[in-house]
Image: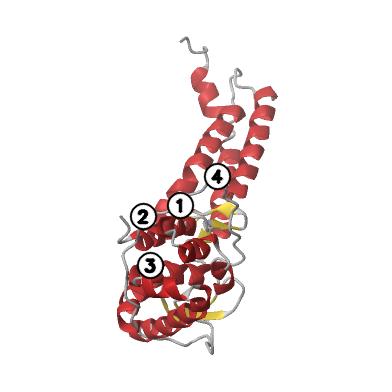
Amino acid sequence: MKLIANWKSVAKTAHSMWAFYASLFCLLLPEVIFWGFEIDTNPRIWWVLGVALLIYGIIGRLWDQGIDRTKMRSPWVVGVMALGLVVVLAMQHGTSLTNTVTGTSEPSVTAEIATPASAPAATASSDTSFLEIAVPFVGRWEGLRLEAYLDIVGVPTVCYGETKRVRLGDSYTKAECDEMLAREIISYRDRLRPAFTSQTLANRLPIPRDVAFTSLAYNVGVSGTSKSTAVRRLNEGNIAGACTALGWWNKAGGRVVRGLVNRRSEETELCMRGVA
C-alpha cells in the first residue's frame, strides 16, 4: 500500500477525514455511555448523526480545502462541534435502564417450544419467603432514590418509583422504601393471581417462578402479563416455554432495550429454576 504524498496534511485537515473520525466516535460512544453510566441511548440519534456525518464527508471530499497550499485551513472546529453535539444529544435523550416500561407489546412468535416431560411440584409462596427474593430483585432493576425528585414527566417520585402521596422534599430510609416496594409487589402478585389456573397455583408456581412473573407484571403491567403467552403456556403445563416467553418482553417504544433484555434474562433464569 502506497500512501499519497500529502497524507499527513489530509489526515489532519481534510473534512472527509474528520467525518470518518466523528463517525467512529459515534459508533463507540453509545457503548461507552452504556457500560460507564448504564444509560441505553436512543439509536435514532446515532442514525441521524451518522447520516449527517456521511453528508458532511461527501461535501468535504469535493470541497477545495487548500490542503496543498502553503497555508492550510483545518476543520478541527467543525469536528469538535460535531462531537460536542453527539455528547449533548446522547445524554439528553438517553433512556435509563431503570425506567419502567409501559405499553410494551408482546411480539408474535410462531415457533413451538417442546413441553418438558414433567415439572416438579411446588408449594405456595408465603409472603415472607416470596418478598425475601422479590424485593431485592425488583428493587435492583427499579433503582432506589431516598429523596423525592421529579420524574421524566414531572411527577414527584421517591424510593423505587413510588408516586402516591409524594411531595418534593420528602425523604425516606432504605428500610421504609423496601416496605413500600414490598406492599406494591404483593399488590401486583395478588392482581396477577386470577390469570393462573388452580393447578398452576398449586403445582407450577414455586417462589422463584412466582417472583419472575410478578416482576414482569410490575414492569409491564398486570393486564399485559395476564394475557401473555408466558401465562398461557404456564397454565398449559409448558413451563420451559412459559419461561422462554418472558424474554419476549424486551422492547420499549418499538425497539429492543438492552436493560430490558438483561432484566428478562434474569427473570427467565428465575423461572427455569427446578426445570430439568
Mark 3: give few (<14), some (14-19) or many (20+) Cα within 10 Å.
many
The CA span between labels 1 and 4 is 14 Å
> From this viewpoint, is residue 37 visible?
no
Residue that badge 4 annotates: 83
Which of labels 4 and 2 is toward the front? 2
Q: CA distance from mark 4 to mark 3?
A: 46 Å
Identify the residue position indicated by label 3 in the image. Answer: 209
| Mark 1 element type | helix
Q: Amino acid at mark 2?
A: Ala
Q: Quadrant of residue 215?
A: bottom left
Q: Decide: marks 4, 3 in contact (CB < 8 A)? A: no
Question: In what element is the residue under mark 3?
Answer: helix
View extreme (top): residue: 2
Please state if 14 lies on the left or on the right of 211 as rendered: right
Give the structural element (helix, strand or loop) at label 4: helix
Q: CA distance from mark 2 to mark 3?
A: 18 Å
Residue at horizontal 31%, vertical 83%?
128
**In the image, is residue 52 above or below residue 269?**
above
**Quadrant of residue 173 in the image?**
bottom left
Q: According to the image, label 1 marks what residue?
A: 33
Kind of residue sitting beneath label 1: Ile
CB under 8 Å between discs 1 and 4 = no
Q: CA distance from mark 3 to mark 1?
A: 33 Å
**Which callout, 3 or 1, points to the residue nearer the camera?**
3
Helix, strand or loop at mark 2 = loop
Q: Are marks 2 and 1 in contact (CB under 8 Å)?
A: no
Of the residues tagged 2 and 1, which is closer to the observer?
2
Mark 4 vs mark 2, CA separation in Å: 56 Å
Camera-side residue of 252 and 66: 252
Mark 2 sits on what residue? 117
Tell me which label, 3 or 1, sits earlier in the chain. Answer: 1
